[in-house]
Image (cartoon, coloured by chain):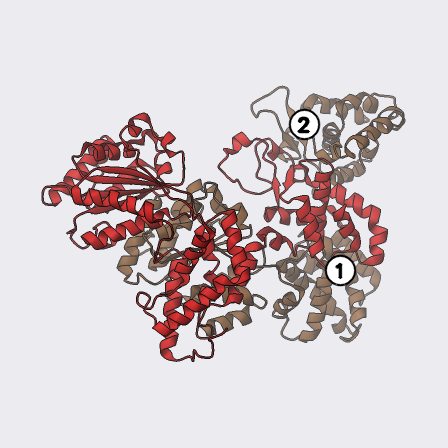
Chain colours: A brown, B red
Amino acid sequence: MSTIGERLLTKFPGRNDQIEQLLSLLGEPEDPAPPCVFVYGPSATGKTSVIRDLFSEYDTSGCHYAYINSVECFTPRLLFERTLNAWAGHVPSPENRFSNYARCDNLVDFVNSVRDLLVTSGKQHEARYMVIDQAERLRDRGPMLLTSLLRLSELTGGANISVVLISNVVWDKFRPRHGGAADPLSIFFPYYTKQQILLVLAKDCPVDEPQSFFLTFVDAVYEVFHRNCVDLNELRHLVAMLYPKFVQPVFEQQATRNEFARLFKLCQPYFAAASERLYLREISTSEWQKYSAVASAKNNPEDVATSIYHMAENSDGMDLPHYTKFLLISAYLASYNPSRLDVQYFARGKDPTQKRKRKGGGASAAAAEDALGGRDRQQLLGPRSFAIERMLAIFYSVIAEPVDSAVDVQTQIASLITLRLLTKTSAGDRLDGIKCKCNVSLEAIRAISRSVRFEIDRFLYNFT
Amino acid sequence: MPSRMSLSGNATQLADTSRARKAVLGRLYGRAPLPNLVGLDSPLDLVFSLLSRTVTSAEGNTGLLIGPRGSGKSAVVQRALDMLESKHGRGAAAAAAAATVPTSKYHVVRLSGFVHTTDRIALRDIARQLLIEQDLENILIGSFADAFTYILNLLRSSGDGSVPPVLFILEEFDLLAQHPKQSLLYTLFDIAQSQQTPIAVLGVTARIDVMDLLEKRVKSRFSHRQIYVQCPQKKSDFVEIARSALHVDASSDGVAKTFAQQFNAQVDEILAAESVARHMAHIFDFGKDARQLLYLFVTAASQLSAQNQLLQLACVEASIAQDVASAKMQVLSSVSLLELCLIISMKSLVQGGSSKYNFEMVYNEYKTFMSRHLLVASAGGAMKVYKKPVALKAFETLVELEIVRPVATSMAADGGGSYGRNDLLAGSAQSARAPKEYRMVQLMLEPGQVVELVLDRVDVPAVIRRWAQQ
C-alpha cells in the first residue's frame, strides 16, 4: 500500500495531501468503501490523472474499478453497460460479437445485474468503484440519475460499491433539488502553487539541458504569465514553445548560459508574441516552430522583429468581394446604429461628422453616459437585428458608385448568411421581411473598412 | 494522544485497529446499522408492530413513515425488519438468496421511487423479488391489477396453497405516487384492504404533504396510519448518534476489551473537545442531518492504521475546517489576477445597478478602471491591460467553473428542473444568435464575498484591493 503511495507521490509532486487522503479512504479491498466521493478542483490540477493512476495501481486485477467519461457515455445505458463490462472484466470483441456483459436499459436492470455480478464473482465484500469523469454532465441526464448514483450502494442492497465523481464544478452546483442524497465526501484539488509548478515542470526538462538553468527559465515564464494564467497545461505549452528560442543564442555563441539577463532580453520579443498569439492558439504549434526558426538573434535584431511581426500579422481569411465588404459594413452599421439617426448619417450631401457634432453625438451620448454610466451603449450590448431593407438603404448610401444588379446583391446576402457573418433572426421559411444581425467584431470590420478605404469610425454612433 | 505509549504495535492490536476501522467506517458510511437508534423508539415500535401483525396474524396493513431527510426513516425500517427476522427466521426477499428455496414465512419486497420509475418496471421487479422466474412478457399486456393477482397466484401455487405474508417497503413513496393513474399504489392498497392476501404496505417519504398526492380512490383505500419520524430534539441526542457510531464494542465488533476501552475513551474525548462540540452544535442548529454529522469523522476513521491506532482529534478538526470553508471560495482563492479583476469588474457592475451584463461590459469596466489607474499601478507593481481575447479566455475559465452563469432568458423554457449546460454557447434559441461576447451573464458571488476573496490574497496590488472595496 505504502509503495503505491510513494510511487504516486514521486509521479505527482504537490498532490501529497490528496493522494494520502484517497489512499486512506480506499484502505484494504475488503474495507467498506465510501458510498460516494466527490473530487473537484479547477482544470489542469491533476484530478483525472491522479485518480486513474491510483486505481490502476491499487486494483491490479482491473475488475474493481470502472473509469467512465461522462462525455463519452452520454446516455445512462452506455454508462451502466460500460461499468458492468469493466467490473466483469468483459471486453467486447469479435468473439462475442461485440456484445456487452448485460443489457441495461434502465436503473432496475443495472441494479439487478450488479447484484448478480457480485454474487457470481464470489468476491462480494471487495469494494467496487465507479469513477465518473466530467460528472457535471450527469446533471442533464435526467433528474434521478445523479441521486440514484449517489445512493447506488443503498439501492443494490448494501453492496460495497463506491461512486467517484470527478468535476471542476463545486458540489453546491450538483446538490439535487429534492435533496435525495447526503453530500458526498469531497476531496479538493487546488491550483498548483509556484513551487509545485516548478516541481512538475522539472520533469519536462530536456535530457541534455542542465536542470537548474531550465528551472530558472520556467520561473521567468511563470512570473511573466501567472497574472493571466495559472493553468499548468498552458504554462507547460508556453515553456515547451519558448525554451528552444531561449537557448538558441547559446548554441549560436551569442551568449553563455550564465548571462541569464541577456538571454532573457534576446528572447523578449518572443514572450510578447507568445502572450497573445501562442496563448490564444491563434498560431499553431507547427506554425510557431516554422516561423520562429526563420528568425534568430544571431542574424540581427531587426530580423527578429520582422519575423515576430510576421507571426503577429493577421492574415485573416476575410477575403470577400468588393461589394460584399460594403454589404458587411452596412450590416454592421445597421446593427449598431440606432435607426433614428440614419437620416443624419446617410442622407446624401451631408457631412456626417458635422451633423453628429451638432445634434446626435454630443447631447444624447452625454445623456446616455449620465443615465447608466454609458453601459447601455449598443457597442456593449451587442448587435441588434435589423430589417434587410434598412441595410440595403445604407449600402446604397455608403457605396460611392451605382450598383446595377439587385440580384447579385441578394446572392451576396445569402452567402454572408451562409458564412455566418450575418445571422438570420427571422423565421427560416420567411421570404419577405427578413431580419438579420451582424456577427462581426469591431476589429474585423475596421480591417475590412480599411481595405476598401471606408472610414467606418465616422459613421458609428456612440463608440469608443 | 494519551494512551499511545501503552499501545505497542503487536499483531493482535493491529488486527484490532483494522477491525475497529472497518466497523466504524461501515457505520459512518451507513453500510452497517447503528447499534442503538437514538430517540426513534416510538416510531420503531409502531413500524415493528405494523409489520409483525401482518406476519403473525395475517392482517392487511398500510402505513406511511414520514420524516425529514436524514432523520433515520430507513434505519427504523431496517431495524424493524431485522427484528422480524430474528423473531421469525430469514425472509426470502433478498435476491442474493435466489438459489435457496424460500422456506420462510414471509417475503419482503423493496421498491424505490428512484429506481422504479414506471409501474411496469416496478411490477417486473416485484416478480423478481418474489422469486418468480417465469417470463412475464405475456401477462404484462393486461391491466396492472390482473397481472398483480396473477403474480400472487403464482406465489400461492408455489407454496402450500396459501399466500405467505408479503411486506412491501416503498421508499420515496412520493415519487411512486407520481406515476400516472397510481395503479401500483391502488392495487397494493386494495389488496391490503380486501384481506384476501396478507400484505403490509409501508411507504417511506420525506414529503409531509404526501397525502395530497394520492388520488381519491387510492386515498380511500389507505388506512391513514401515519408514523412520524423526527430529527433529534436535543443536542445531547445528536451527539449520542455520533457516539453510538464511533464507539466500538468488544463483542460485536470483535476487538479486544482493553482496546475497545481505550478507543472509546478517545472517542469521548474527541466528542467533548470544544472545537468538535461547537461544530456539532452548528450542524444541529442548521440541519440536524445525522449523515452530515457522521461524515465529519470519516477522514479520521479512515486514517486508523498501525501508526494511529486511535482516532485523532487533529484529523477531525481538519475535516471540520474543510466543512466550514466554502468550496467555491476555495476554488477561487487562487485564480489568476486577471480573473480576479474580471470578478471585481462584475461586482462593480452589480453595484452600479446592472443585474445582468455581458463580457463586453465587463471588459469595458475593467479597461476603464485600468486606464484610470494604470499610472499608479505600474509604479507599485507590474500591471498591464490585457487584450480582449486574453480577457475572454480568462472569462471563459470562470464560466467553466460556473462562477459566472448565463442568464436564462426564460425560466419556463428551462423547465425548472434541468440544470442545463454552463456554456456561453449553449443558451436559449434567442440568445444563441448573439456572439458569445454579448451573452448576458451573472456572477454567482455576493459583493461581500468578492471583497473577502480579494482581502484574503497577498499578491493583489493595492490599487485593485481598493477598487474591490469601493
- The location of residue A379, given as percent across then percent down, is 75, 34
Q: Residues within 10 Å of mark 1 (few under 14, many from 20)?
A: many
Instruction: Please indicate whether residue B295 sits to the left or right of residue A433 in the image.
Output: left
Quick one: A395 or A65, which is closer to the camera? Answer: A65
Which of discs 1 and 2 lies nearer the camera? The answer is: 2
CB under 8 Å between discs 1 and 2 = no
Query: Looking at the image, is A195 positioned above or below residue A95?
Result: below
Furthest toward the left, the residue is: B160
Identify the residue position indicated by label 1 in the image: A270
Amino acid beneath label 1: Tyr
- Picture disc at residue B75: none
Q: Earlier in the sequence, mark 1 or mark 2?
A: 1
Residue B383 seen anywhere in this rendered image of the structure: yes
Quick one: A162 or A52, which is closer to the camera? Answer: A162
Q: How many marks?
A: 2
Quick one: A340 or B271, which is closer to the camera? Answer: B271
Question: On the image, which quarter does residue B193 sit in?
Answer: top left
- The location of residue B162, given as percent across then percent down, is 12, 41
Q: Chain of mark 1?
A: A
- Picture disc at residue A385: 2
Identify the residue at horizontal 62%, vertical 19% (top origin).
A432
- The location of residue B358, given as percent across then percent down, is 68, 38
- The location of residue B467, given as percent across then percent down, is 77, 48
- Asked which secondary structure carries label 2, the reply is loop
- Asked which secondary structure carries label 1, the reply is helix
Q: Chain of mark 2?
A: A
Instruction: Please indicate whether residue A163 sits to the left or right of residue B171 in the image.
Output: right
Amino acid beneath label 2: Ser
Give the quarter of the figure containing the C terminus of chain B.
top right
